[in-house]
C-alpha cells in the first residue's frame, strides 16, 4: 500500500497560483499544481463558478477538479475587484485562465498588464486553439473531437462518437500545468516569467498523432476502432455465462499455448493456421466465433481466475460508479475520503464520498487530499486580510457587492465526520 506524502515534502510547496478558470480544462491545471503542493487561489464571480450548479453529465466537474484550492469571490468587472486581483498577483508565481480570447485584456488582466505588475509571473492560458486561423472559434471538447479525428476513430463507420470522458479538457489542463512547470524551471535561470498556452484542438491532434503516422507508414487510413484490423489475434470483448461480458487478450505466441491449455483447446493449439499471432489475426473471422461459443460455458469470474493464474491480460467490464469499491484502488490509496460542499449536490447537503487521486507516486508515496473543494468565498476574508484590507474595508466591499465571504468550516479531508456534515 502506498504511503501518503507529508505536506512539507510536496514539490510545489511555497508556489502561489491564482486561477480564474471554469469548467474542466483550466481547473484541471490548477488541481494538478495544487495536488503537487502549490497554494491555488480560485477566483470566482460573486455568483460562484457556474459548474457548482451544473447537473447532467457536468454534475461532477466542480467536485472533481477543484480540490486542494482556496476560494475568493470577487466582482472583477468593478475596478475595485480588479485591484484585489492585482494585489494577489503581485506576489504570485502563476496565473491561470481559460476565458475567450480578449476577455482578460478587457478586464486589465491580460499578460501584458500583469507582467508589468509582476515580471516574474507565469501566465497560463487554456484555449480552444493556439494562435492561428481557428483561434476566433468557440471550442468544446466535443467540437475538437469531431474536427480532430478522435470521434471518427471512436465510433463505428459513419457514426462519429465522442470519447466517454472529457479527454481533451483534462489533458489540455495537464499540458497547461506541464507548461507552467517548465516556465518555473526556466525562471530559475532568467528571473522572468512568460506566457504559456495550451489548447483543446492541438491536444486532440496529439492524441490521434499515432493514427496520422499509421497512415504515413502504411499508406492506408486508420479504420475506426470498432472496425479496425486488430494487431492481435485475440483482443476483444466476449459475452459469457449469465449475460456477463469480459475483455480478453492473447497478444503473443507465448500466451497462446497456456490459453489453449487452460481452456481445453488442444485442436486450436495444434492448428498450423493459428501458429503465430499474425496468422491468428488473419483467422479472426472464424476463430473468434469458435472461442465465443466455447467461452459461453464459463462465468466471468471463472475466466478471470484462469487468466489471472496464467498471467494473461483480461478485464471485467465495469461502470464508473463500480470503481468506488475497487479493491486495488482501496488497497493502494488511489481513492481519498472527501466531504463535498452542499452546493455540489442535488440535495443541497454536504456529501461524504471518495475521489480519485493523481495517478502517480513520488518516492513511492501518493499525493494526498489536503482540502476538499472549497465553499464559495470561504477564503475571501483571510486572503484580503493578508493583503492589508481592514475589517472596515472588507465590510464596505461586501456591502457594495464587490466581494463575497463565507465562513470556512474546518475540514479533515482524510476523515470527514458526522460533525462536519452537520455543520456544512
Image: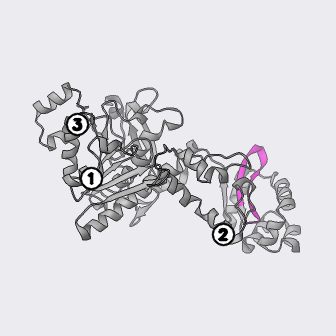
Q: Residue furthest front?
A: 133
**Residue that label 3 marks:** 81
| Residue bearing mark 1 | 112
Magenta segment includes 242: yes
**Left or right: where 83 falls relative to 67:** left
Camera-side residue: 204 or 421?
Answer: 204
Q: Is residue 168 left or right of residue 13?
A: right
Mark closer to the observer (3, 2) = 2
Where is residue 282 shown, x and y percent of the image?
82, 67
Q: Is residue 70 visible?
A: no
Find out whether residue 289 is within the magenta segment.
no
Q: Tags 1 and 2 in contact by the CB under 8 Å rule?
A: no
Query: In terms of sequence position, does the residue under pointer 3 or pointer 2 come before the other?
Result: 3
Q: Tell me the SS state at disc 1.
A: helix
**Residue 323 coordinates in the image, percent (x, y):** 55, 47
Circle 2 is placed at which residue position? 216
Instruction: Give me the residue at 10% from left, 36% from top.
Output: 390
Mark 3: which secondary structure?
A: helix
Above or below, comparing residue 306 to residue 92 in the picture: below
As drawn, the label of residue 333 is: none
The answer to whether the residue labelled 3 contacts the one labelled 2, judged by CB atoms less than 8 Å apart, is: no
Q: Residue at x 36, y 32 (%)?
A: 421
Read off the magenta span. 232-248
Which one is in front, 376 or 409? 376
Q: Is residue 129 visible?
A: yes
- Within 10 Å of disc 1 (Cα), the crowding (few <14, some 14-19, many 20+) is few
Q: Rounded to the nearest whole Å, what is the CA distance between mark 1 and mark 3?
A: 19 Å
Question: In x, y percent, where is residue 257?
Answer: 78, 72
Amino acid at each position: 500500500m502506498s504511503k501518503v506524502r507529508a505536506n512539507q515534502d510536496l514539490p510545489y510547496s511555497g508556489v502561489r497560483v491564482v486561477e480564474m478558470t471554469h469548467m474542466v480544462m483550466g481547473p484541471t491545471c490548477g488541481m494538478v499544481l495544487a495536488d503537487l503542493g502549490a497554494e491555488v487561489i480560485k477566483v470566482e464571480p460573486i455568483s460562484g463558478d457556474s459548474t457548482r450548479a451544473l447537473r447532467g453529465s457536468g454534475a461532477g466537474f466542480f467536485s472533481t477538479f477543484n480540490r486542494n484550492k482556496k476560494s475568493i469571490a470577487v466582482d472583477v468587472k468593478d475596478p475595485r475587484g480588479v485591484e484585489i486581483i492585482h494585489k494577489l498577483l503581485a506576489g504570485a508565481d502563476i496565473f491561470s485562465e481559460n476565458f475567450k480570447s480578449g476577455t482578460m485584456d478587457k478586464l486589465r488582466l491580460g499578460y501584458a498588464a500583469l507582467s508589468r505588475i509582476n515580471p516574474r509571473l507565469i501566465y497560463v492560458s487554456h484555449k480552444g486553439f493556439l494562435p492561428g486561423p481557428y483561434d476566433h472559434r468557440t471550442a468544446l471538447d466535443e467540437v475538437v473531437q469531431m474536427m480532430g479525428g478522435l470521434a471518427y476513430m471512436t465510433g463505428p463507420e459513419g457514426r462519429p462518437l465522442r470519447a466517454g470522458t472529457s479527454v481533451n479538457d483534462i489533458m489540455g489542463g495537464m499540458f497547461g500545468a506541464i507548461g507552467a512547470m517548465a516556465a518555473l524551471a526556466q525562471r530559475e535561470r532568467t528571473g522572468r516569467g512568460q506566457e504559456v498556452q495550451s489548447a483543446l484542438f492541438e491536444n486532440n491532434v496529439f492524441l490521434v498523432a499515432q493514427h496520422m503516422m499509421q497512415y504515413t507508414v502504411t499508406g492506408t487510413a486508420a479504420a475506426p476502432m470498432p472496425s479496425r484490423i486488430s494487431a492481435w489475434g485475440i483482443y476483444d470483448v466476449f459475452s459469457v455465462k449469465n449475460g456477463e461480458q469480459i475483455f480478453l487478450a492473447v497478444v503473443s505466441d507465448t500466451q497462446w499455448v497456456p490459453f489453449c491449455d487452460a481452456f481445453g483447446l488442444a485442436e486450436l493449439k495444434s492448428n498450423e493456421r493459428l501458429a503465430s499471432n499474425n496468422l491468428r489475426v488473419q483467422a479472426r473471422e472464424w476463430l473468434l466465433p469458435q472461442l465465443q461459443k466455447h467461452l459461453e460455458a464459463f462465468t466471468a469470474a471463472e475466466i478471470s481466475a484462469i487468466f489471472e493464474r496464467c498471467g494473461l491480460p483480461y478485464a471485467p467490464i465495469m461502470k464508473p460508479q463500480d470503481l468506488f469499491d475497487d479493491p486495488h484502488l482501496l488497497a493502494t490509496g488511489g481513492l481519498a475520503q472527501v466531504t463535498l460542499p452542499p452546493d455540489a449536490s442535488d440535495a443541497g447537503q454536504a456529501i461524504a464520498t471518495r475521489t480519485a487521486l493523481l495517478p502517480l507516486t513520488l518516492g513511492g508515496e501518493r499525493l494526498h487530499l489536503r482540502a476538499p473543494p472549497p465553499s464559495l468565498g470561504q477564503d475571501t476574508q483571510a486572503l484580503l486580510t493578508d493583503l492589508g484590507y481592514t475589517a472596515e474595508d472588507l465590510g464596505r466591499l461586501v456591502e457594495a457587492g464587490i466581494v463575497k465571504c463565507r465562513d470556512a468550516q474546518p475540514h479533515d479531508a482524510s476523515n470527514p465526520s458526522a460533525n462536519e456534515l452537520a455543520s456544512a
